[in-house]
Image (spheres, rainbow, N blue to C red):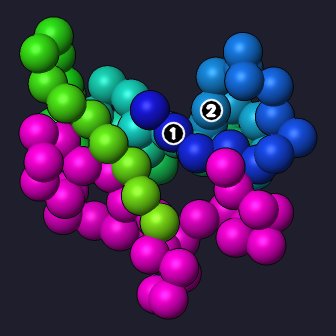
Amino acid sequence: MGFCGEHILLTSQPGLYLYSSTYSSGGLHQESCNFGEYGPKYTVGDVVGCGIDWEAEVCFFTLNGQKLRKLFQPLRLKSRLI
């Protein structure tokens, strides 16, 4: 689950390219950098979501309807995340 700029191919994995980030295996990955533990690992049956708080200029992920404890600054909000 992740975010990416409009120029990223939808077949690409977020978090591995410029203007992209992902929550995967419990970690946060941005622009091919591993930022370590972000939240619990998810498994079959879990519901993962993501969102942007445009006023606070932060992104977040949810797990089973609960916002994860850390918010993070998106890579470049002006890149028009999709």
Which circle marks residue 14 in the picture?
A: 2
Q: Residues within 10 Å of mark 2 (few under 14, many from 20)?
A: many
Q: Is residue 10 above or below residue 21?
A: above
Q: Is residue 26 above or below residue 25?
A: below
Q: Residue at x 13, y 48 (%)?
A: 65
Asked whether residue 71 is drawn in magenta, I would say: yes
Asked if residue 27 can be seen in this view, the reply is yes
Label 1 residue SS: strand
Q: Residue at x 62, y 32 (%)?
A: 14
Tell how many labels: 2
Q: Which residue is mark 1?
A: 2
Residue 23 picture quarter: top left
64 to the left or right of 78: left
Asked if residue 37 can be seen in this view, the reply is no
Magenta segment: 53-82
Q: Is residue 16 above or below residue 37?
A: above
Instruction: Give coordinates of residue 48: x percent, y percent.
Output: 27, 35
Q: Is residue 49 above or below residue 46?
A: below
- Front position in the image: 76 or 34: 76
Instruction: Give coordinates of residue 4: x percent, y percent.
Output: 68, 44
82 to the left or right of 38: right
Label 2 residue SS: loop
Mark 1 and mark 2 in contact (Cβ < 8 Å)? yes
Instruction: Give coordinates of residue 34: x percent, y percent.
Output: 52, 40
Amino acid type at image mark 2: Pro
Among all residues in the image, which is located at the extreme top? 44
Quadrant including the N terminus = top left
Q: Residues within 10 Å of mark 1 (few under 14, many from 20)?
A: many
Distance Cα–Cα, label 2 vs label 1: 6 Å
61 to the left or right of 5: left
Amino acid type at image mark 1: Gly
Please report whichever mark, 2 or 1, sits nearer to the chain's N-terminal start: 1
